[in-house]
Amino acid sequence: MVDKRSTFQEAVQYLPSGGTLSLGGMTNYRRPMAFVKALIQHFKETGEPRELTLANFTAGIESDLLVGAGMVQRVRSCYFGLEIFGLAPMFTYYANRGEIEILEETEASLSLGLRATLAGVGFMPSRIWLGTDLPKLRPDVRTVIDPYSQEELIAFPAIKPDVAVIHAIASDQQGNAIIGKNKGVDEEIILAADKVVLTTEEIVPKLEQVDLITQFVDCVIPSKFGALPTSCHPLYQIDGDALLNYVEQVSDPPSFATYLSRFLNAD
C-alpha cells in the first residue's frame, strides 16, 4: 500500500487561485482548522491561492478566517455562522457591503450538485425550488423538461471542488480514516473533489473499521488537535471561550488583522 503521509507545506500547493475549496466537518464540529492556518500562512508568503470559491455544506470559523484574510471571492453554502456563538463576523462584514459574491444555496441544491458530479453528469434534476423565488437569485440554475412526463424540473449544475479537506479522528498512513457518526457530506465531497487532503488526530497502524478509504485520499497529514477551537468528538469538545473571543474581538478588517496575527503566531 502507498504511504500517503505528507506535510501542510506540500498540501496547500494543491489549491490553485480561482479554485473551489470544500472544507469538511459540520458547523462547529471537526473543521480542518490546522489546514486553514497553513493555507493562510502560505497566502501571506506567496499571494496564492486567491479568489477562491468556498463550496461548503456549512461554513464556520474556518471559512470566516479565509474570508477575513482576503482569499475568498465567492461563497456557496446553506449556512455561514458560528451557531450559538453568533454571526461569522468577517463574512457578515463583507456580505453586508456587497464585497463578496454569495451564491444562494440550500441543503438540497448543494446535495444535488454533488450528486450530479458523482453521477458523471452536468446537472441533477429535481422539483426542489419550484414555486419559490430562489431561481431568480441563481440565473445559472436553469429548468429542463422531463422527456417522459413533460414536467418542468429545476436542473442543478454539478459541483466539483478542486480540493476537499477533511479532518479525521484517526487514519492509517494510506488514508483510510474514521470521521465519526456526524459525517456531514464528507463522504460525498471526497468522491467529487479532484484532490483530497486528510488531516488526522493520529496515524495508527491498523483500523478495525473505516469511513473514508484510501482510493479517494491524496495525502495524509498528522494534526493533533487540528480541529480546535471546533470539536472533534469523542476526543475533545468545542472551545467555547475561543469562539466567543473571536466574535467579541473581530468586527472589521483592522480588528481581524490583529486577531489573525495572534492566530498565525500561536503554537
Image (cartoon, rainbow, N blue to C red):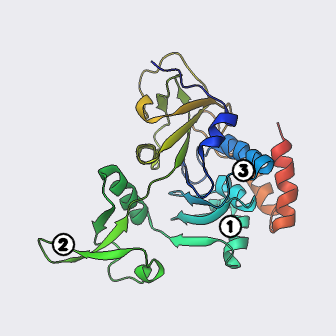
Q: Is residue 74 visible to the viewer in this orientation of the structure?
A: yes
Q: CA distance from mark 2 to mark 1?
A: 38 Å
Amino acid type of the residue tagged 3 in the rendering: Gly
| SS assignment at label 1 | helix
Q: Nearer the viewer, mark 2 or mark 3?
A: 2
Q: Residue at x 38, y 82 (%)?
A: 132
Q: CA distance from mark 2 to mark 3?
A: 49 Å
Residue that protrudes farthest toward the top in the picture: 205
The residue identified by callout 2 is 146
Q: Position of residue 164 (x, y in %)?
A: 53, 46
**Quadrant housing residue 101:** bottom right
Label 1 CA crowd tier, 10 Å (few <14, some 14–19, many 20+): many
Amino acid type of the residue tagged 1 in the rendering: Phe
Mark 2 and mark 1 lie on one chain; the one further toward the N terminus is 1
- Position of 141 with respect to 102 (left or right) is left
The residue identified by callout 1 is 91
| SS assignment at label 3 | helix
Q: Residue at x 69, y 56 (%)?
A: 66
In the depicted structure, whether residue 233 falls above or below residue 109: above
Q: Residue at x 42, y 21 (%)?
A: 208
The residue identified by callout 3 is 240
